[in-house]
Image (cartoon, coloured by chain):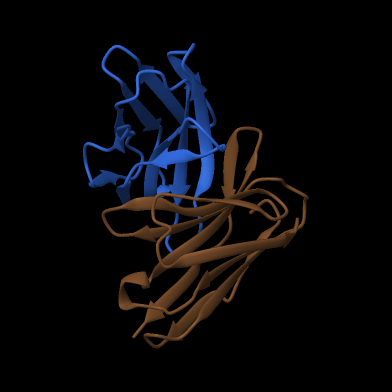
Amino acid sequence: DAGITQSPRHKVTETGTPVTLRCHQTENHRYMYWYRQDPGHGLRLIHYSYGVKDTDKGEVSDGYSVSRSKTEDFLLTLESATSSQTSVYFCAISLGGEQFFGPGTRLTVL
Amino acid sequence: GESVGLHLPTLSVQEGDNSIINCAYSNSASDYFIWYKQESGKGPQFIIDIRSNMDKRQGQRVTVLLNKTVKHLSLQIAATQPGDSAVYFCAEPRNTGNQFYFGTGTSLTVIP
């Protein structure tokens, strides 16, 4: 997994509660990404980062925010979770033109 | 806009047979493609890539073919094994930010 960990790996929460997912990498990669994966949609980009405090929106960024205060950590926050945000979330880093993925976080919003 | 798609959502093959998974793309300017394998409960893993100046690239038991005329690429797995059971999808780069478009995937099931 190119030194990428995600936490938590599983989470169940209720509608309206805030949720933060963490991606941690150990190899000083500049680019980091958050995706969600849903049946029939493949991987869709939520937000990405190209350096500390440098982030930008992806194609499905509504309802999500991110922060990157240090190189190794990229946080994804759902300010007020909704059932439509039930999904599997993957973090990725970019290395040599390829993307390497973390193990994923399965989030269920009831 | 650009899109990456797959012809078949599921594929079942007998162990030992060869598998072929297809992918269509729409951006003729794409110069690089990647195939990923995703096992159940895990993140996608890089299998093989190919640049647009190539028609074919071989790896260990896998071959990727690129047909730029019809904007199609395929992943061939030789002598398919039970451990090959997974979802396979292709990816092509977007124009900015080291980003990729990902296909929805084909689920390969290997029958022992």
Image position of B106 (left or right of B80): left
Compared with B99, B76 (above or below) is above
> Vertical placement of B87 versus A103: above or below?
above
Counting every numbered tag in the picture gives 0
The residue shown at (39%, 79%) is: A108
Q: Which residue is at the front of the view, B2 or A90?
A: B2
Percent coordinates x, y for residue A36 in the rendering: 42, 59
Q: Residue at x 50, y 78 (%)?
A: A10
- The image shows residue A54 at horizontal and vertical percentages of 66, 50
Q: Is residue B82 visible?
A: no
Residue A36 visible? The answer is yes
Q: Is A88 drawn above or below residue A94 in the view shown? A: below
Q: Nearer the viewer, residue A63 or B2?
A: A63
Chain A colour is: brown
Q: Residue at x 47, y 66 (%)?
A: A64
Q: Horizontal and vertical percent for residue A70?
A: 76, 60
Q: Is A31 on the left or on the right of B32, as rendered?
A: right
Figure quadrant of residue A88: bottom left
Chain B appears what colour? blue
Query: Quick one: quadrant of the N terminus of chain B?
Result: top left
